[in-house]
Structures are given as C-alpha cells and as structure tokens.
Image (cartoon, helix red, strand yellow):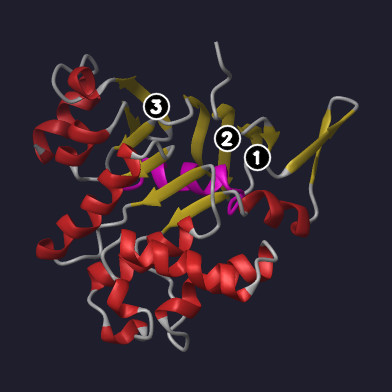
C-alpha cells in the first residue's frame, strides 16, 4: 500500500504549563479530506499549525510527502532546521486561516502572485497567468485589480484559497475558514472547497460545519483535550459515534 501523504506520530505541544497536545497520531492518504472537529480549545488549530511548523512540536514527528517537517534527524536525535529550510518545506503546504490575512496594500492579483515569485522563483507572466486561472476557479475573475477592503469576507477568503493554491501545494490546511464569515457568505467558500475535494486535493480542515464534513470528508476526527478520541468515516463518527465525548459534542452542534 502507498504511504500516507501525512503521518503524525506522538505529537505533543505545551504552552508553559499547559499541555495542549497529548501524543497525537494521525494519517491522511493522498487525495483524502480529513475534517477535525471538537470544542474550542481542544487542540485542533494547534495541531494544524504543527503540521506546517508554524508551531514547533515538543515531541513527535510530522511527515508530509516523506519529509520530516521542521527537523533533521542525526544519530537518533532531532535538530530543528534553519528557518529558510522550513520555509521551503512550508511552500508545499498551503494554509487558509480564519481571518484571510491578505495584504491590504496589494491588489487581489498581487496578493496571489507575491509568494510564487518570491519563493518559487516563478516569472511574472507565469505567476499572473496562474493567478487569473485560480481567480476564475474561485469565481472572482473580475476582481484581479480590486483591493481586499472592497471585497466581502467570503470573497476575501476565496482569494486566500487562491493564494494558497498558487504555491502548487501537495496539501491544503484550513483553520476554520468560515468561522469569521456572515452566515450568507459561508456557502460560497464551502463550494470552492467542495471543488478542491472533487479535484483530489488532500485537505485537513478544522471546521464546525458538520454538513460539509458529512458530505465531503473521507475521515472525521473528533478531538477532546488534546487527544483524538474518535476517528472514522463521517457516517460512523457523525452518525453513530461510539465515544461519550463525541456524542456529547454532537448533541450540541447538530
């Protein structure tokens, strides 16, 4: 069998005296969509940030595409990579945040083309062509010259998705991408994500959108107090959960 694209082993993370992640193990195959669900403070976003080394795990290994993210291993001990090497690894892992994080002084087109030119060395004509293609894909072909402040929240989040895709990642991470949106704008972002899933993009999505998880995910993992306590297909985790904590959580959100 093929190796999983993402393999987490024994991931631990502590902030001061508070241990947020307690030895998390997780695998995601290429082309799969995994939705992470759970109450606020359960460790979902921290786990996501450990995958692309925005947070450094205190223990454990993050393997993406066969590479140990953030560390070299020598003589049985791990050594953190220089930031320039971590950035090179991170280029293959797209991430979409809750609050868009677009550069307000750049146009939509410039927001999308900046990183491919700086990090990947893409020339301007190729970067612009890629950006226009991606804007069409997310339904914003007419917004290339607009500035972020003129866009709705849903439009800004779709630009953020296009910006992530412009780096040609092997993995996309979504950290509650609809939580900051007005309810009527949520659907347009989820539609783009459905399209990515249909195209075979490997995705890990922290979400409270249970309908999306039920419809699109191959796996759902429920986190509680820094641990994955239940994982499986949506029909099982959302439809017939076996763990008391999962049942309690779903009774409040479904």
Local secondary structure at mark 1: loop
Q: Is residue 131 above or below residue 32?
A: below
Q: In the rendered picture of this protein, how many numbered marks are placed on residues?
A: 3
- How far is mark 3 from mark 2, CA to CA? 12 Å
Which quarter of the figure has residue 239?
A: top left
Q: Which residue is mark 1?
A: 58
Q: Which residue is mark 3?
A: 228
Local secondary structure at mark 3: strand
In the picture, measured across the screen, residue 139 lies left or right of residue 119, that is left
Decide whether residue 7 is among the magenta residues: no
Decide whether residue 48 is among the magenta residues: yes
Check residue 223 in the rendering and tell me which mark sits there, or answer none: none
- How far is mark 1 from mark 2, CA to CA? 5 Å
Q: Which residue is mark 2?
A: 12
Give residue 27's position: percent from left, percent from top. Answer: 49, 24
- Residue located 77% across and 59% down the image: 84
Q: Which residues are magenta?
A: 40-55
Residue with the most extreme right position: 75
């Amino acid at each position: 069998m093929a190796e999983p694209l993402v393999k987490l082993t024994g991931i631990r993370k502590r902030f001061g005296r508070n241990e947020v992640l307690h030895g998390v193990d997780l695998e995601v195959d290429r082309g799969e969509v995994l939705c992470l669900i759970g109450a606020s403070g359960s460790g979902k976003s921290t786990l996501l940030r450990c995958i692309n080394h925005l947070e450094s795990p205190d223990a454990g290994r993050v393997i993406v595409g066969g590479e140990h993210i953030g560390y070299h291993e020598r003589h049985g001990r791990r050594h953190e990579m220089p930031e320039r090497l971590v950035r090179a690894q991170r280029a293959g892992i797209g991430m979409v945040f809750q609050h868009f994080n677009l550069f307000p002084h750049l146009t939509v087109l410039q927001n999308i083309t900046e990183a491919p030119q700086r990090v990947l060395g893409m020339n301007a004509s190729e970067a612009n062509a890629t950006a226009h293609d991606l804007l069409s894909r997310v339904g914003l072909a007419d917004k290339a010259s607009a500035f972020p402040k003129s866009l709705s929240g849903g439009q800004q989040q779709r630009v953020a998705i296009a910006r992530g895709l412009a780096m040609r990642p092997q993995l996309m991470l979504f950290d509650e991408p609809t939580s900051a949106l007005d309810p009527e704008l949520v659907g347009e972002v989820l539609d783009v994500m459905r399209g990515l899933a249909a195209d075979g993009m490997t995705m890990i999505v922290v979400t409270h959108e249970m309908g999306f998880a039920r419809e699109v995910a191959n796996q759902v993992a429920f986190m509680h107090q820094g641990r994955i306590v239940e994982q499986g297909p949506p029909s099982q985790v959302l439809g017939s959960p076996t763990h008391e904590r999962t049942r309690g959580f779903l009774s409040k959100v479904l």
